[in-house]
Amino acid sequence: MAILRFDEFELDTDTPTLKRRGKPTHAQDLPLRLLILLASQPGQLLTREALFEQFWPQDQTGILDDNLNTLVRKLRALLNDDARNPRFIATVPRRGYRFIAPVMTDDTAAPPAPDDTTSARQPARRLTGALGTIAFATLSAILAALLWQYLPDNRTNQRITVAVLPFNNAQGSNTRDYFSDGLAEDILDRLSGFQGLRVVSRTSSFSAAGTQQDAKAIGQLLGAATLVEGSVRRNQDRVTINVRLIETTNGFQTWSRQYQRQLSDLSAVQEQVALEIASALADEITPRQPAVSATVAIDPAAYDAYLKGRFFWHKRSEQDLKMAAELFEQAIELTPDYAPAWAGLADALAVLGFYDYLPPKEAFTRAKGAATRALQLDPKSASAEANLGYVTLYYDWDFEQAEAHFRQSIELSPDYSKAHQWYANLLVAAGRFEEAEREMRIASQLDPLSLIANAALGWVQYHAGRTDDALAQFRLTEELDPEFELLYLWRGLTRESRGEYDRAIEDLNRAATLSGRSAISVAALARVQALTGHHSEADALLAELQQSGGYLPAYEIAKAHFALGRTPDGLQWLERALSERSHSMVFIRVDPQLSDSRQSGEFEALVTQVFDAE
C-alpha cells in the first residue's frame, strides 16, 4: 500500500487516514474513499458514471447526481478546496473529476533488502500513471462495469443509446449550417420513435460535438454506445447525405450509407435513413406508427424555412424566437399540412409567452391553435401534446387537463426531455416538489448538457426551500456555460431569499446584461434594490420598464411594489396580471417572494380566482 503526499496532506491508503501538516483530520468514510480514487491517479479523469458504479451500484432512486455532488462538496470542504479555483479537484463539466495536484508516494509494503535489519521505507517519488495496488483493483472493477454496459452482447434486454451529432455541410469546408443541423435533428426525432432506442436529446448531442473530443469521450459524456455522424451536400434541387455509425467503445465505423435524392423527397429519405440506422443497430428494433405528415408532399422551400425556424428557435433570444415564428409561418403557408412546422410554431409562441416577450393572450392562444393543428395532422406528435399541456397550464390554468397532456406526451415519447421539464413546472406550481424534482432530474439526465434543464433543477429546489442545493446546482450550470442568463436570474432570486442581497444584485445585474435588459430581470432587480432600502434606484428601474414600450410583466412588477411597502399598488398589479392571464399566476401559492403577502384577504381572493379556473 502507498502513502500519498500532496501539498500539506498525507493520505494513508491502508488505514485509511488523512493527515494535514502531520495532524490527523476527521474524515468520513465516503469522502476518504473518493480521495483515494482521485489521488491514486493524478491527472486522470474519473467519470461520473464510474463513480456511481463504485459508490452506489444498486441505487434505483434516480438521485445519484445529488449524491455525488454532495460527496464531492464534502471532500472539497475536507481539503479546503474551491470549485471555482481548485487546488486539488477539478470538475470536468458533465463528465467527472480530475485530481490536479502533484502527488508523491512512499511504498509502505516494500520488502526489506536481505542484509537490512530495519524496514526502512523507499524514498519518496512522483506517482506516475501506474496505479497503486488498491486503486488498480478498484478502478478495474469500475472500468469492467462500464465496459459491460457498452458491450453489444450485454445490451439484449436494454435499450441501445444512440447520439446523433450535427451533420457537416460538405460544400462549406465541413462546417455546420442550419440545413445540415436541421437534417440531423430531423433524423434524431425520427429515431426517437423506435421502441428499442434511447436517443440523446439534441441539445446535449450537438453540444458534445462542439467539444472536439473523440468518439469514446463523447460516448462517455453522453452515455451513448453509438454515434451517428453525417455530411450533407446540396446541388441545386438535389441533396447527397452521407451517414455512418461509430462505436464509442473503440471508435470503429460499423456502418455507412450514401443517399442521393431530390430535395422534394427529403422527408421520405430521412424516414429511410432512420429505419436503416435502427436496423443496423439491432434487428429487433421496431418503429412506432409512422406520422401522418410523413406522407405529405413538402415544398422544398417550406422545408428550408422550417429548418431555418428550428435553427433560430434553439438560440432562444427574443428576436430569434420571433424570427423562428415567422419562418414556421412561411413553411405553413407553402405546405399547410406539414405537421412539424405547426409544432414548431407552437414551440416558438409558447416560449415567447413564458418569457413575457409577447402578451399572454397573443402568445398562448396562437400556440394552442398551432399545437391543435399539429395534432390533427400527426396524432403521435409528442411535441404538440406537450405544447397543449404548456398552454393549458399557463393560460387556461387547468392543472388537471394540463397534467393529462404532459403525461400523454411522455407516453408517446418517454425520452422527450422537454415534456418532463414542463411537467415538472406544473408540479412546482401544484406544490408537489418531490415529484417535480424527480421529473426535472429525468429531463436533465435525458439531456445532460441542456442548460435550461440543469438550471431549472435549481429553480425547483429554490421553490422547495432547499437553497443550498439550488446554489450548488446553479454552480454546475455555470460550469457548463457562464453566459447563460437564466442561471443568474434564478440564482439572484435564491440569494435574495437567503438575505444575500449584495450577491443577488450582482447576479441580477448580470442577468439583465446578458438578456438585453429583459423585463423580468429588471423587475427582479428593482425588488432587491427595494429590499435593501434603495427605493430611488428601485423606482428608476420600474420607470425604465414603463418607458420601454414592451409588454410589462405585471406579476413581477407587483412583487417589486410589495418589497417597496406599497401593498395596494402590488395588489393592483396582481389584479392586472390576473386580467391578462399572466402565466406566472399559477405559481402564486408557492412563490417564495410572496410568502409575506399571503395573509391578506385581498391576496387570498386573487388566489381563489386563479385556482377556481381549474
Image (cartoon, rainbow, N blue to C red):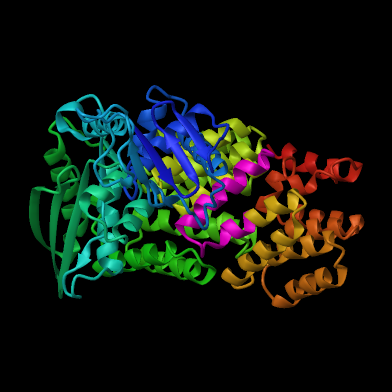
Question: Observer-nearest residue: 478 or 204?
Answer: 478
Q: Magenta includes 485? A: yes
Residue 407 visible in image: no
Location of residue 595 in the rendering, given as x and y in whole percent from the top left corner: 80, 43
Q: Judge whether 232 appears above or below 162 on screen.
A: below
| Residue found at x 38% / y 52% | 102
Q: Position of residue 106 (x, y in %)?
A: 34, 39
Q: Is residue 406 left or right of residue 488?
A: left
Quarter of the picture holding the N terminus:
top left
| Front-lying residue, 147 or 598 | 147
Looking at the image, residue 157 lies above or below residue 423: above
Q: Residue at x 27, y 61 (%)?
A: 212
Looking at the rendered structure, the number of numbered marks drawn on it comes to 0
Q: Is residue 292 left or right of residue 425?
A: left
Residue reaching furthest top?
Answer: 58
Indicate yes or no whether the magenta region holds residue 601.
no
Residue 312 appears in the picture as rendered: yes
Magenta stretch, main secondary structure class: helix
Residue closer to the observer: 260 or 140: 140
Residue 242: percent from the left, percent from the top?
12, 59
Q: Quadrant of residue 429?
A: top right
Left or right: 200 in relation to 61 = left
Location of the C terminus by quadrant is top right
Q: Give how far across and how far down residue 426 sits, in percent.
A: 59, 40
Residue stretch in magenta: 463-490
Q: Residue at x 50, y 50 (%)?
A: 476
